[in-house]
Amino acid sequence: MTRTGESFFIASLRWCIPQYARRMSGTTRITVTLPTEQVEELRKMTDNISGYVAEAVARQIRNELLGRYLDDHEAEYGAFTEAEMADAEARLFGPEQSEEPAVAA
């Protein structure tokens, strides 16, 4: 991939996430031990704990794969510019607020 047009970071997200999703198939039953407090909170939040945990694990795997992919890209092409990082952050998290709200004295 090159750094033209769309931010490389955003292009990486568009590439990495579908690549991971295509590799998933089937399910395997496992046992996971969690702190009691977490299980209590999970039960308040959802009736499908397995689905909730699977979604959290998938998100973590995508994040780690993307991180590795971006590290490899930086190793080959150099660090991302401030402009590329600002563009990626704006696309992921929305534009920055131009001013902080004034604090009453």
Image: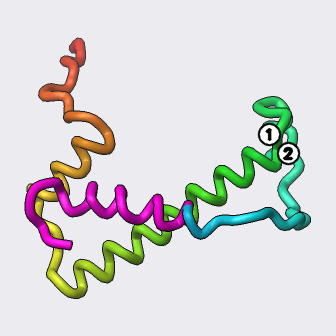
Image point (22%, 20%), residue name? 101
- 31 up-or-down from 43: above or below: below
The majority secondary structure of the magenta stretch comes to helix
| Callout 1 crowding tier (Cα within 10 Å): few <14, some 14–19, many ≥20 | some
Quarter location, residue 35: bottom right
Q: Residues within 10 Å of mark 2 (few under 14, many from 20)?
A: few
The residues colored magenta run: 1-21
Q: Which residue is mark 2?
A: 39
Q: Amino acid at mark 2?
A: Val
Q: Position of residue 80 (x, y in %)?
A: 16, 68
Q: Look at mark 1 in the image and give the residue it sits on.
A: 42
Residue at 15%, 80% in the rendered image: 78
At horizontal 36% and vertical 58% (from top left) the residue drawn is 13
* Above-or-below relation of 13 to 90: below
Between the C-alphas of marks 1 and 2, the distance is: 5 Å
**Residue 38 drawn at (x, y percent):** 80, 46
> x, y percentage for residue 77?
15, 82
